[in-house]
Image (cartoon, rainbow, N blue to C red):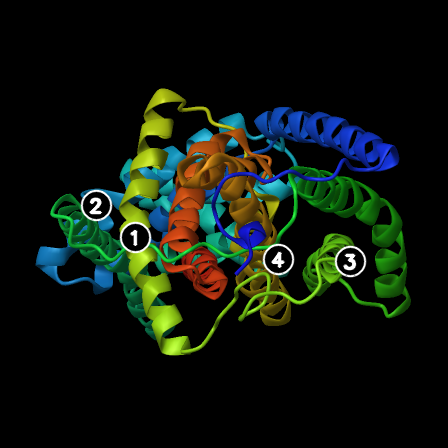
């Protein structure tokens, strides 16, 4: 093992060519401007949090008649119809589309629910029947709710209520149990480390690259090439191809997201391949140290660390919500998944979120950045720097703190276990949980 692929004192590095230094400096300046602009723009994006809360209330209204008595108020809340009517009223009043055809289903459902809660059953039927009569709204969740409110004893409505009850359990009870398990594992890990019984971290192996190489990879490849140039060059070609094939929404959006992400990956990975090729033969397991085998062991470490990180990310999100109730917008992909009812489109979103994003982001942030930063700055600062860059790269001020905590967990897993494959699996599990929750709420 050479000093270049494990933590230790920084050795003398030959001076980089002048052009390389200037290119890195220019890339860094452009990246900082692009990321700052993206973070500021996130303030104007809608947050998916309100939509998630509304979908959970919709599930509660559908599921309430199917829930056993003791569980009804626990899972659905004391008055789910009233809570949903209030949430819909807030959506109607705050939406920029208020009065537009897109907002009509929400307005009709809100009016019907409010009249039902006021005891005016006869007048409540008019807006709900109007909602059911429009064939263009067949896939909208508001239509299913209107039918459940008008025909609560219909066999199809009762079956829908049972399915909604199962989904409600999936988005409330299951996360609570997982959270409790994560707290127990986290306390156990802290106890073992306090008692000095935790295993020592293996030597951290990684590419024998310098800080300038990492700047060129992340600032030049990830940001300038991937996030700036790729959409400008690839998006028109991709849209033209989809139009020529007569592919329409929502599959069009799914294929666009998948195609653009594949194109975004290409530039940075090509730069990384050229950088690694110049290093010569790497250590056993390769420069990036994926080390998937044994797969069961990598998966077990990934799942265990994920469970321990979940309570910390939840706490960070809770604190951020208390300190900043009007947080910035979420990743646009979350909204697409939540509102999509097309299976092929969901498959495209799922492949992007659960397969491509973990593999690509972990290669960049924990495969390259973390080992190089650890060698230069030490383990603590290396993990923190990789987590900070990972969080900022998602361009959402409202999600910055939870993403930072998630990045710290992923960095700790890379440092403590040495395997990049475990980080990819943990990231995929995290995205998979988020994706499943969105599908359960939105389907």
**Residue 411 marker:** none
User: Mark 3 or mark 4: which comes first in sequence?
Assistant: 3
Q: Residue furthest top?
A: 323
- Residue 284 located left or right of residue 254: left
User: Mark 4 or mark 2: which comes first in sequence?
Assistant: 2
**Are the residues tagged 2 and 1 within 8 Å (C-beta)?**
yes
Q: Which residue is mark 1?
A: 60
Q: Which residue is mark 2?
A: 77
Q: Which residue is mark 3?
A: 274
Up/down of 247 relative to 296, above or below: above
Secondary structure of the residue carrying numbered label 3: helix
Secondary structure of the residue carrying numbered label 2: loop
Q: How far apart in space, not on screen, are marks 4 and 2 (Cα)?
A: 41 Å
Rendering quarter of residue 86: top left
Up/down of 265 relative to 232, above or below: below
Q: Residue at x 39, y 69 (%)?
A: 298
The answer to whether residue 110 of the structure is visible from this angle is no
């Amino acid at each position: 093992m050479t000093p270049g692929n494990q933590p230790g004192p920084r050795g003398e590095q030959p001076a980089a060519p002048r052009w390389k230094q200037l290119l890195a400096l220019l890339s860094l300046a452009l990246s900082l401007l692009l990321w700052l602009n993206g973070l500021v723009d996130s303030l104007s994006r809608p947050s998916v949090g309100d939509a998630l809360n509304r979908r959970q209330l919709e599930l509660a209204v559908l599921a309430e008649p199917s829930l056993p008595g003791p569980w009804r108020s626990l899972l659905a809340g004391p008055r789910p119809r009233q809570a949903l009517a209030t949430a819909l009223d807030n959506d109607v009043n705050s939406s920029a589309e208020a009065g537009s055809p897109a907002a009509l289903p929400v307005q009709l459902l809100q009016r019907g629910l409010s009249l039902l809660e006021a005891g005016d059953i006869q007048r409540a039927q008019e807006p709900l029947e109007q909602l059911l009569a429009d064939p263009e709204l067949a896939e909208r969740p508001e239509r299913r709710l209107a039918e459940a409110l008008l025909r609560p004893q219909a066999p199809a409505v009762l079956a829908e209520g049972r399915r909604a009850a199962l989904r409600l359990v999936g988005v409330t009870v299951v996360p609570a149990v997982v959270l409790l398990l994560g707290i127990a594992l986290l306390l156990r890990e802290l106890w073992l480390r306090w008692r000095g019984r935790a295993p020592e971290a293996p030597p951290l192996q990684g590419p024998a690259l310098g800080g300038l190489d990492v700047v060129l990879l992340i600032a030049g490849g990830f940001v300038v090439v991937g996030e700036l140039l790729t959409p400008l060059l690839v998006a028109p070609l991709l849209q033209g191809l989809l139009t020529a094939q007569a592919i329409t929404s929502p599959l069009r959006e799914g294929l666009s997201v998948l195609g653009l992400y594949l194109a975004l990956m290409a530039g940075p990975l090509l730069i990384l391949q050229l950088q690694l090729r110049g290093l010569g033969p790497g250590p056993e397991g390769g420069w990036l140290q994926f080390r998937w085998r044994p797969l069961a062991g990598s998966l077990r470490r990934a799942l265990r660390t994920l469970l321990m990180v979940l309570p910390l990310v939840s706490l960070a999100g809770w604190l951020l919500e208390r300190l900043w109730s009007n947080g910035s917008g979420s990743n646009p992909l979350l909204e697409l998944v939540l509102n999509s009812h097309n299976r092929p489109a969901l498959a495209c979103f799922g492949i992007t979120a659960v397969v491509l994003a973990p593999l690509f982001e972990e290669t960049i942030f924990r495969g390259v950045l973390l080992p190089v930063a650890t060698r230069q700055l030490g383990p603590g600062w290396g993990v923190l720097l990789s987590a900070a860059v990972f969080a900022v790269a998602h361009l959402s001020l409202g999600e910055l703190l939870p993403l930072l905590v998630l990045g710290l967990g992923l960095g700790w897993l890379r440092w403590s276990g040495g395997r990049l494959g475990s980080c990819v699996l943990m990231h995929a599990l995290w995205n998979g949980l988020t994706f499943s929750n969105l599908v359960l709420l939105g389907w």
